[in-house]
Image (tube, helix red, strand yellow):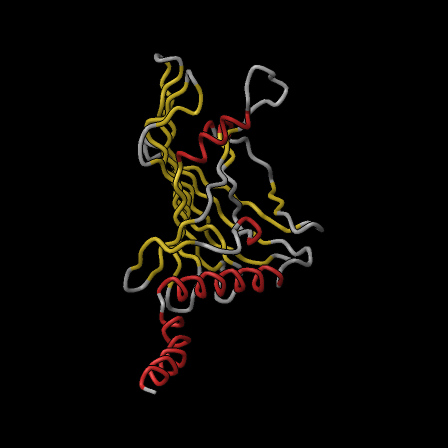
Amino acid sequence: MFRLVVIALGLLFFPFANAQNPEHLAQEAYLQALKHIVQARSAISDGRSIAFVEISENRTGSQKTKQRQLRLNEHGNEVLYPKVKPSDEDELINWQSSIMVEPNRFPKQAKLIRETKSTWILSIPTTVSAKIDESNQEVDSSKINKRIQSSLVTELTVSKQSPRFLALKVFAKKPFNPEAMVKVHEFIVRFEFAEAWSGGPLITRTVSKVLTGSYAFFIDIEAFSITRYEQFQIVN
């Protein structure tokens, strides 16, 4: 009889225990944050344009400011104008990023790594890849990108209060060789997110990139940039 009572109490307690499990709570926060992104994004998917200011800064502290606009096309893809010449690191790497956060780029589930008092730190698959000329038969782009993605770690920070994405960090824990003649010494890219305006879509507020390495042992690769996006407003 006593054993039956213990089992019954265990069954009653299990749903409560599961609900308080950090992994469960983190996953719930992640899904709520994704849902919010979809809902806020759908509010401007009718072809309206959003104006914003782009401020880019290089290693010396020199800044360039541009007035730009974005809209979502009929397929829901982000279109930016005026178009600008990509930076050196953007010529090398497909960062899989956008100014307006794209929910389809995130998986259905994320793995809890650790937590703080106010945030969940989650692991998601790395989607960053190298831009490779597919017509070059001597280069196996699939093999190179598998090496890159297996060498990089992607961590997503989610707020516990009013769950939303706060930041995404992609980095290498140690140097790696994406191909024989190339060595990456340091790879860090961090995206910080915020609402474009109160109740508005989630946007990338700041992107910082550091990429150092070498090619053929004597050619140095070095890229550093910080880009901020500010003053978002609907213009039509």
When the figure is inspected, residue 137 is found, relative to residue 123, above or below; the finding is above
Task: List x then y, in percent, for residue 53.
Answer: 49, 48
Q: Which residue is found at the position 53% from the left and 45% from the top?
A: 98
Residue 74, above or below 189: below
Q: Residue furthest front?
A: 1
Nearer-the-camera pick, 55 or 110: 110
Point 55% across, 54% down: residue: 103
Q: Please identify the quarter of the rendering in which residue 17 is found.
A: bottom left
Q: Position of residue 38 (x, y in %)?
A: 57, 60
Question: Which residue is drawn at the image coordinates 51% and 26% (left, top)?
Answer: 143
Residue extending furthest toward the right: 74
Looking at the rendered image, the quarter that the N terminus falls into is: bottom left
Rendered location of residue 147, percent (x, y): 45, 29
The residue at the point 38 percent across, 68 percent down is: 161
For the C terminus, the quadrant is bottom right
Left or right, 151 with respect to 115, comes to right
Whole-percent x, y for residue 68 in the image:
55, 45
Vertical relation: 151 (above or below) 194: above
Looking at the image, the residue that sits furthest to the bottom is 1
Q: Nearer the viewer, residue 34 or 3?
A: 3
Q: How many marks?
A: 0
- For this rendering, which residue is in front, 72 or 171? 171
The answer to which of 40 and 217 lies nearer the viewer is 217
